[in-house]
């Protein structure tokens, strides 16, 4: 019985660690695809603030100092500010990055309606947020399942 408890705790820790790593991997991939943000202070700051934003949206909406909700709302303002600055830099630059942000800022067809900065930022936040839990949870559970069932893993390895 004691072994089963230890094993359950080990799996819980593995799942928690794995989940955290996969969330960070997802966030890295999303930022790269959406805005070509991979490394540096901007990537680090965006990841940190987006993590706070997600925690804030999952918290009770108590807007008091020190609550996850308040930190989440502050993080959203910070992310919006960082994205606005990034958009200004992109508009000032003649070069193209061939990512989603460039496509939104420089539409191919001038006849298509252009999105406002607020709409672009909301779209980026929606894409990042919607994939944050869904992609990371599905990936984490797949890896955990393969870890827990070596027979299935072996079947996947055989051509």
Image (cartoon, rainbow, N blue to C red):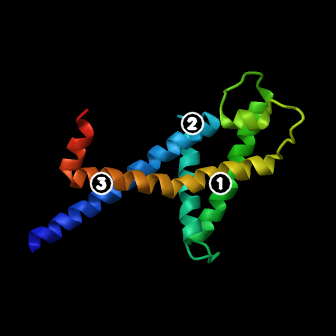
Location of residue 86 by image quarter: top right
Q: Circle 3 is placed at which residue position?
A: 144
Q: Nearest the camera: 154 or 97? A: 154
**Residue 61's spot in the image, x, y percent?**
62, 76
**Disc 2 and disc 3: Cα gap in Å?**
26 Å
Q: Residue furthest top?
A: 95
Q: Quadrant of the C terminus?
A: top left
- Please say if 52 is above or below 99: below
Q: Circle 2 is placed at which residue position?
A: 32
Q: Residue furthest front?
A: 159
- Please say if 101 is above or below 5: above
* Residue name at image x 65 percent, y 52 percent: 125
Q: Is residue 9 left or right of residue 124?
A: left
Q: Secondary structure at mark 1?
A: helix
Label 2 or label 3, whichever lies nearer to me, is: 3
Q: Nearest the camera: 149 or 28? A: 149
Q: Circle 1 is placed at which residue position?
A: 126
Q: Nearest the camera: 89 or 98? A: 98
Residues tagged 2 and 3 counted as in contact (Cβ below 8 A): no
Q: If you read the primary sequence from the N terminus, does the residue marked by circle 2 or circle 1 appear first?
A: 2
**Disc 1 and disc 3: Cα gap in Å?**
27 Å
Q: Is residue 147 left or right of residue 27?
A: left
**Disc 2 and disc 1: Cα gap in Å?**
16 Å
* Residue name at image x 38 percent, y 55 percent: 19
Please rate how many residues cluster around mark 1, counting C-alpha atoms within 10 Å: few if below 14, some from 14 to 19, many from 20. few
Q: Is residue 64 left or right of residue 112?
A: left
Q: Secondary structure at mark 3?
A: helix
């Amino acid at each position: 019985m004691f072994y089963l408890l230890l094993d359950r705790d080990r799996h819980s820790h593995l799942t928690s660690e794995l989940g955290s790593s996969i969330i960070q991997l997802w966030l890295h991939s999303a930022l790269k695809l959406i805005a070509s943000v991979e490394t540096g202070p901007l990537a680090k700051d965006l990841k940190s603030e987006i993590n706070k934003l997600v925690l804030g949206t999952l918290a009770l909406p108590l807007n008091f100092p020190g609550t996850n909700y308040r930190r989440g709302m502050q993080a959203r303002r910070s992310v919006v500010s960082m994205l606005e600055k990034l958009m200004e830099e992109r508009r000032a630059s003649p070069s193209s990055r061939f990512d989603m942000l460039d496509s939104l800022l420089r539409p191919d067809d001038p006849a298509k309606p252009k999105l406002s900065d607020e709409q672009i930022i909301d779209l980026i936040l929606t894409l990042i947020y919607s994939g944050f839990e869904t992609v990371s949870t599905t990936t984490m559970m797949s890896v955990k399942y393969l870890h827990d069932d070596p027979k299935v893993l072996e079947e996947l390895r055989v051509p």
